[in-house]
Amino acid sequence: MSSARVDYIAPWWTYWLHQFPHVNLRFQPLDHTFKPQEENYQQSLIFLGCVAAAGLGVNLLGLAIYLSCLCCCRKDEEEEESKKSNSCCVTWAAVAAGLICCVAVGVGFYGNSETNDGVYQLTYSLYNANHTLAGVDSLVTGTMGGMQSGLNEHLSRLGEIFAARGDFVQTLQFMQQMSDNIIKQLLGLPDWEKAKVDLAAIADQTAYVEYYRWLTYLLILILDLIICLAACLGLAKQSRWLLTTMMVFGVLTLILSWASLGADMATAVGTSDFCVAPDKFLMNQTKDVISSDIVHYYLYCSQTLPNPFQQSLTVFQRSLTTMQIQIQGLLQFAVPLFPTAERDLLSIQHLLNNSEASLHQLTALLDCRGLNKDYLDALIGVCYDGVEGLLYLCLFSLLAACAFSVMLCAIPRAWRQIANRDRDYDDIDDGDPFNPQSRRITSHHSHQGNMHSFCSYSSSMGSQTSLHPPTQAVSNAPLSEYMNQSALFGGNPRYENVPLIGRGSPPPSYSPTMRATYLSMTKDQIRHFGEDFRA
């Protein structure tokens, strides 16, 4: 199998992030080596968070200056020009903010998923490595327990049985030496129990933190999308209270975006420092627990490297083989003389067979290929998917900050435009015939007044003497009256059925029935309606 350096190559973005300046809070440059336990290195990561906080301050300051200028310059703008520019700016700002927000949310979902996949692969590899080390510890403990208790008990009873035969007793003593030799070799193996506990604790803690990180970002993404949609709805509905509420939430989301940017950037830089030289960090961390030869063997797993367990496993195998040969000889020569010894000899033979099976399993578990594969999978998960996902989350934070900054610039203009519209609407004269409110009032009072149209006179033309002038002029007859009386003049609604007497409006088009009625009127009636009635 090729070495780990060939199988694992740190991605380019980890080298790019590794080159970021590492400065402590006293502005002193530091080494870029991954040293999470040192206070200065922790301060260098905190410094990156402070840079994001400074960006937030600049952003809020720019928004404050923009709003101040907007409030101070509002009196200097011309009314017509202000309406056109405000409408155009608000429209394009809303479109830009909506598009940027949608892109940011999409990027955020992808980055959150990639980071979660990388961390899951890390924890999965840690649990696999923990399972391997736990298996090694279980085999070693079981074999040592069988040798120390079971084998010694059987050898003691056989010593009493073979007391009369010195050659058989000497064989038992030789087997005891082989058993002690096996125990000595097993004791020379590393303390896997301590390493197993550390890996399990790291995996559990990592999985716990990742779950809440993933859930937090999911809620942030949903919150950003809801705020963006609500702001667009407020602009479309021209709702001032909704725009004001979204402006407050927009400021909070802007702060949250910059905070997440600082946290993601610090995490990405720290992880990249580890990914650039992971073997060096692991060898420094395990030097007090496991020998450097063993760590080097598992990290690089090269065929050119010697197996540090080869000698112990070889001695184990030879001792077992020698003991099995001795047991076979005793079963062949001692059992015919001492039949009571057969049971203990068969028990020892069964114990040796189990120990040999454990030896084969132990040899497979101690091979570097299993743990090295878990090591490479963990590196690929963290340094490829994990760091890449963090970079996408940083991009999401920047895009979200831009989107909400544009939104916070557009909302005050939209709010002011809505206020100007309401003020202009309130300034309309109630007596204006084109005011919708005035039309509703006129429509309400028209049913109570003594108002007659030309249609009422034409319906009573049976007697010229019964025609009397109306008590008041018709003004702004409602549309319902226009349409309801259209049937009296040919049923065609395109003809005006009510003369526009006294309204100062252009002459309408008359139907043939209306014209015939007009020609049958007397001069006094024509004089009463005035010259406006003439076509």
Image (spheres, helix red, strand yellow):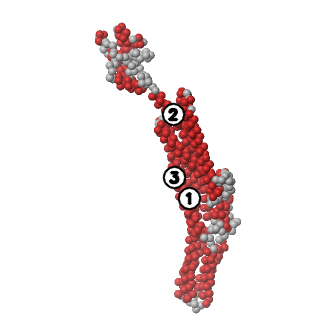
Which residue does the numbered mark 3 point to in the structure image?
A: 215
Does residue 508 appear to the left or right of 204 in the view shown?
Answer: left
Give the farthest residue toward the right: 304
Q: Position of residue 279 (x, y in %)?
A: 66, 61
Mark closest to the chain's N terminus, 1 or 3: 1
Question: Could you tell me which residue is drawn at 32 percent across and 15 percent down?
Answer: 459
Which residue does the numbered mark 1 point to in the structure image?
A: 206
Q: Position of residue 20 (x, y in %)?
A: 66, 51
Which residue does the numbered mark 2 point to in the structure image?
A: 416
Residue 176 seen in this snapshot: yes
Quadrant for the N terminus, please: bottom right
Question: Could you tell me which residue is drawn at 58 percent across and 61 percent down?
Answer: 125
Question: Could you tell me which residue is drawn at 33 percent across and 15 percent down?
Answer: 470
Give the farthest residue toward the top: 523
Q: Secondary structure at mark 2?
A: helix
**Amino acid type of the residue that numbered disc 3 sits on in the rendered structure:** Leu
Q: Measure the alpha-carbon separation of dots 1 and 3.
A: 14 Å
